[in-house]
Amino acid sequence: MKNRPVKVNGSAPKDPPKAVEYADIAGQGRVPYGKTAVPPMAGNKMRKMKMRGAGAAIKGTSYMGC
């Protein structure tokens, strides 16, 4: 018996798509992707905060947050 390579879901593509910095919407043009930024915070000091909701109200739990 002759050994043959096993193909799973067909063969690999010859030319994979290149990465671009925009979304090309057909008939509408290009839209640039947004840049990453630090999310805004309410404050920089850590403080004890109360959890909200029916289950948390019964348990009376809390957590540290900004």
Image (tube, rainbow, N blue to C red):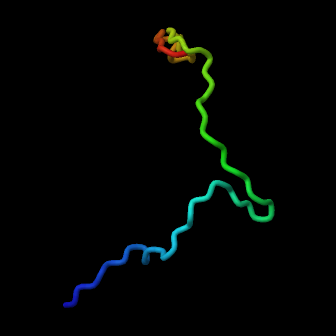
Q: Residue at x 48, y 74 (%)?
A: 13
| Rendered image quadrant of residue 38 | top right
The location of residue 40, given as percent across then percent down, is 63, 25
Residue 5, quarter of picture: bottom left
Q: Residue at x 63, y 42 (%)?
A: 35
In the image shown, does 56 or 27 lie closer to the viewer? 27
Residue 28 in percent (x, y) is at 80, 60
**Residue at coordinates 22% horizontally, 90% vertically from top-left?**
2
Report the quarter where the C terminus lies: top right
* The N terminus - image quarter: bottom left
Name the side, left or right, on which 31 lies relative to 57. right
x then y, percent, for residue 53: 57, 18
Horizontally, residue 13 falls left or right of residue 32, namely left
Where is residue 51? Give x, y as percent.
53, 15
Q: How many numbered circles are shown?
A: 0
Q: In the image as oriented, which residue stretches furthest toward the bottom?
A: 1
Name the image quarter holding residue 4. bottom left
